[in-house]
Amino acid sequence: MAVTGFRKRVVALTVLIATAVVAILVVVSHVLLSRVTDADAHDLAHTRAEAVAANVTARGGRVVLTENGSEALDEVAWVYADSRLIDGNVPPSLVDRVEELADSGRSQTASVGDYLLYAREVPMDGHHVTVIARVDLTPYETSEQRSLTLSLILGGLTILLAGGVAHLVVRRALRVVHEMAALADDWGRHEPGRRFNLGVPRDEFGELGRTLDHLLERVDNALADERRLTDEIAHELRTPLTVLRAEAQLAQLSGEPVPTEAVLSEVDRLDTAITTLLRAARALTEKGTRCDLRSAAQQAIAGRAVEVAFPAKVEVAVSPEVAVSLLSPLLDNGLRHARSRVWITARNQGEAIVVDVLDDGPGFDPAEVDRVFEVGVTGGGGYGLGLPVVRRIAASAGVEVRAIADGRGHVEVTLPAARAAA
């Protein structure tokens, strides 16, 4: 329905534009033709009057014609001398107007019904001579009417042709778009890796193909992201659930009660994992927040043996919950691998605050430094929220986090600095 409506709108717009253009052309051509025919009629009247005036002369005190005109000329040209008709036959319907022109004493043009009258004064001493010529305008008007009718017919055919061509062209173009959209939809569901790959766009369809390729790429990335999220959730929740099950089975076999402290510890770990994953999902909606980084770091440390070397006041443009969720897993990771010391520092770097979480452990393998944030890569036998969730929270909150292989445990977190209040 939407495609059909769009096609109708395009065709209607084409017809409207064609109608306007044709109307303008018809009006302009008709006006030009009218001017041309008027000019031809005036020229003919002048020519007739000049031809008759050339034969008017004075003899013996009288005005006469040196040559007798034909009867046809007598019907379209008349000579008046001293307000008296001396040559030609004036139709009764024109007598009054012709005599008025003859007595006017000047050359002029007038229209009477379907006729054009032209009065020409002939200079002659002692006499007032006027030659009046008549031109029938009926053939000119008939020619104009026929020309207008033909123009309207051709204009109507042009409008119909424009509408038909627009319909065919738009239909063909939209068929291509429909086919591309159907293919993209099918690929998105069954073959997300397929692409149009039309190369450098040479026209609008090339642009559309590239746009659809980008759309399919985003769909593919979204599906991959969802798969990663599922893997991360399974990875983060499997360990505490396994511990709880092991404690329950051990208590069942030994006949002793389940250790309350172990159960509560694992339940807390589950709660922390779920809370952190929810924060990762909601981090994108937490815009315009800010927190004191030192205070967030103290919450993340929570009494653990970690040294802090922060400036007195450092504010970052993330929520306190996100900052704690980022730092806490990194500190857990450092404490698991450190020999004796874990410390955390902060420094300004342009419009960002760089936090370094360090320990004196063996550090990251340079060959694995790009994989430490992947699910299942722990770098040891530890457990907890893990680095994959840190990467997800960082990506959601617009934070950069990376591991550095410099012979010690070193993770660098780049947080946006909070802007000063206006």
Image: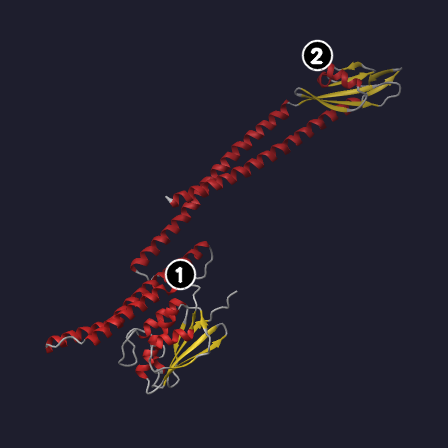
Asked if one can make out residue 231 in the rendered structure from this viewpoint, the answer is no
Q: Along the line of sight, which residue is nearer the eye, 16 or 151?
A: 16
Q: Is residue 83 above or below residue 371?
A: above
Q: Which residue is mark 1?
A: 214
Q: What is the secondary structure assignment of the residue under circle 1?
A: helix
Q: Quadrant of the N terminus?
A: top left
Relative to residue 152, is residue 380 drawn left or right?
A: left
Counting from the top left corner in percent of width and height, residue 397 is at: 40, 67
Identified by mark 1, the residue type is: His
The tag on residue 223 is none
Coloring scheme used: secondary structure
Identified by mark 2, the residue type is: Pro
- Residue at x 81%, y 15% (from the top left corner): 83
Counting from the top left corner in percent of width and height, residue 339 is at: 32, 87
Q: Could you tell me how far apart the alpha carbons at marks 2 and 1 are, in whole angstroms?
A: 88 Å
Q: Which residue is mark 2?
A: 92
